[in-house]
Amino acid sequence: MSDRLTKGMAIRREVLGDAHVDRAEAAKTDFDAPFQTMITEGAWGTLWADDTISRRDRSLLTLALLAAMGNFDEIPMHIRASRNTGAEPDEILQAFMHVAVYAGVPKANHAIKLAKETFKEFGVEI
């Protein structure tokens, strides 16, 4: 296993949690294994491994970008990860408000809806 893959898997587990990563690994097949390796090395072992900005800031950037691009399926996962990155609900709301101004109100509105549902799932009062 490459250093980036090893480091990426460790960071992926720290941010997303063992349960999430274990489910993803159990669902991995020969077909998508190269993709899983690529995102673990690239996203987690390179980008998230860089300490130029904090995981909290990286988490906020990720949530804003996901909302701005309309990649809503990933938002609940990254809301759950905010418990591990230190991004607070009020900061996440501010990130989505930036999305409203710079990328569109409907995208931000949907992201906020998903955040509220996800925070409720793990008992965060907002």
Image: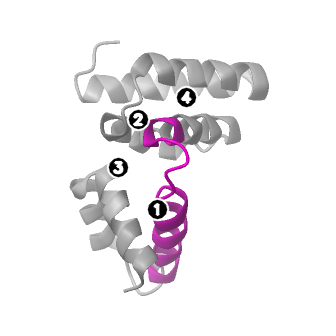
Q: Which of label 3 and label 4 is nearer to you?
A: 3
The answer to whether residue 99 is above or below residue 84 is: above
The answer to whether residue 30 is above or below residue 116 is: below
Q: Does the magenta stretch include residue 41?
A: yes
Marker disc for residue 111: 4
Under mark 2, the amino acid is Ile
- Label 1 crowding class (10 Å Cα cut-off): few <14, some 14-19, many 20+? many
Where residue 61 appears, as percent x and y from the top left, is: 58, 38
Contact between labelled residues 1 and 4, with CB atoms less than 8 Å apart: no
Under mark 3, the amino acid is Val
Marker disc for residue 44: 1
Marker disc for residue 15: 3
Residue at x-position 41% and y-position 67%: 8
Residue that mark 2 sits on: 79
Under mark 4, the amino acid is Ala
Q: Which of label 2 and label 4 is nearer to you?
A: 2
Q: Give the range drawn in magenta.
A: 33-58
Q: Which of 9 and 77 is in front in this view?
A: 9
Under mark 1, the amino acid is Trp
Residue 106, can we see it?
A: no
Identify the image quadrant of residue 23. Answer: bottom left
Which residue lies most toward the front here? Answer: 52
Q: Which of label 3 and label 2 is nearer to you?
A: 3
How far, Cα to Cα, is label 4 from label 1? 23 Å
Secondary structure beneath dot 1 equals helix
How far, Cα to Cα, is label 2 from label 1? 17 Å
